[in-house]
Image (spheres, helix red, strand yellow):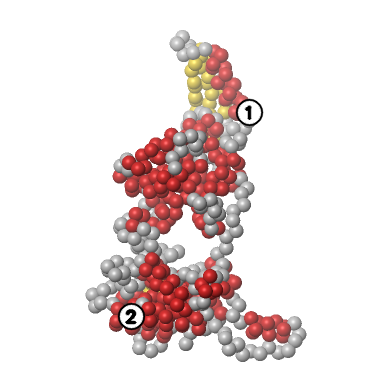
Amino acid sequence: MPYSNDVVFYRLAKRKRRRGHGVRWAVAGRQFSKWFTTEALADNERSMLKQAAKKGESFCTETGQPESVARELKAVSFYDLACEYTDLKWAKAAAKTRQGTSEALAVLAPVLVKSTRGMPNPQELRDALYQWAFHTERRKAGPPPNEYEKAVAWIRANSLKVTELDAPGRRSELIRKALDALALRMDGKPAAAKTVARKRAALSGLLNYAVEKDIFPASPLGKVKWTAPKATDQVDPRRLPGKALMLRLLAAVDEHRPDLTAFYGCAYYAMMRPGEIVALDREACESLPLTGWGKLRFEDSSPRSGSGWTDSGETHDDRQLKHRAEKETRPVPIPPQLVALLRRHLDEFVDPGQDYLFRGKRGGPLSESTYGRVWQEVRRKVLTDKEIERELAGRVYDLRAAGITVGLNGGVPVPELARRAGHSPAVLMNVYAGCLDGDEALWNARLEAAFGGTEPDTEEPDDSPGFAA
């Protein structure tokens, strides 16, 4: 909505009608007028407009109103704006993004209310918001289910006008209240730093949308100083299995669930994300020679998000590769160890008419619960109690991180390793910088020589990283 400071006021007008006293003014040359039953009312309105102009407020060229008044006229409740924002983002968003946005808004809406009088049970209210109100398809399909009716009616009646979030007297209180809610779990304990950052991004997106709609001149989020929990993207090297341990873990998988050995091998040797492995099909196995290196070509990823959030109604969302355009592929050379695992897997565990390499018992995508459960069973067989407690190789994703770390410490150039892993070089270095510690003795020797000591021994230590033989 356009605004201007080119405002001209005229004397009060008078006419022979019931509402015969008028205020007249012009904004950027466009004439406006407002009529009242008495001269006193008209004079009061004219004074209000002149005071707004004197304070430096811009005037809307479409309505003629001061900016503060024009924005208030466009204001909606936080609940209504959140529903609108959900609908705006739904069609193009990945299932996990839909789920995460809905979860964040379901935390925010109950704290941004006029009153808590008559508030439903917090869990019931959050369920109604998460499962229905901020789920575009379910909300558009019809009224809320019976179990959600009261909660939805209450939030509609009590949700704050979104303009309250930028009111000078309330901005700090409300924004801090919203952010503090995002920083807690339902049980009142602090949420993980990454969870807080993700939910804060959803709030930021909603408030920026309000700016687009001219409800705010600028996002009020940036006007409040709030310290978020410290979050780090860096991988903790203490969680990553070394080469010898990785071989023991894969051997244990081979005894327990040989049909999944190649799955975990893909995470380690090809540095694949679990969702990429689930989507792996015969066509992706571009080259699996009897000897030497092979090649995989990834095109799709199937992250799990729940059937309620995907367009297909399946538990896995068929998406392009992470950070890649649709149909863009990522060719990755794979070492002989993985070639052998995949050749055996295709021979022993993939039926002739089966396309995907890893399937669940009923023929659907291999579920996160299945490969996650099997991995925990294997860890309990191989690791000590202390190693389990410190979460060594705690997630399947840690195998991918271990593979990338092997490449880094083995001297593979960062751009090449980033290409294979599906990262940008900058992100790869930021995430894995703390893992560059496998050659400490070599670097110490070189530094000693640089400081004027003895010549360095150029031979690498016996335990230097490299792909497991």
Image position of 41 with respect to 286: above or below: above
Element type at mark 2: helix
User: Where on the picture, by quarter, is residue 252?
Assistant: bottom left
Left or right of 69? Residue 350 is left
Q: CA distance from mark 1 to mark 2?
A: 78 Å
Per the rendering, the mark at residue 345 is 2
- What residue is rendered at 40% in x and 78% in y? 253
Asked whether the viewer can see residue 100, the reply is yes
The extreme front residue here reads 385
Image coords of residue 286 (percent x, y): 35, 78
Per the image, the residue denoted by label 1 is 54
Image coords of residue 18 (percent x, y): 45, 11
The extreme right residue here reads 452
- What residue is rendered at 48% in x and 47% in y? 107
Per the rendering, the mark at residue 122 is none
Q: Amino acid at mark 1?
A: Lys
Image position of 350 with respect to 9: above or below: below
Viewer-side residue, 140 vs 113: 113
Q: Amino acid at mark 2?
A: His
> Which one is closest to the eye, mark 1 or mark 2?
2
Image coords of residue 28 (percent x, y): 53, 31
Q: Earlier in the sequence, mark 1 or mark 2?
A: 1
Label 2, residues with CA under 10 Å away: few <14, some 14-19, many ≥20 = some
Image position of 123 with respect to 251: above or below: above
Cβ atoms at labels 1 and 2 below 8 Å apart: no
Image position of 272 with respect to 451: above or below: above
- What residue is rendered at 62% in x and 32% in y? 56
Number of marks in the rendered image: 2
Label 1, residues with CA under 10 Å away: few <14, some 14-19, many ≥20 = few
Viewer-side residue, 213 vs 314: 314
Viewer-side residue, 84 vs 194: 194
User: Where on the picture, by quarter, is residue 308?
Assistant: bottom left
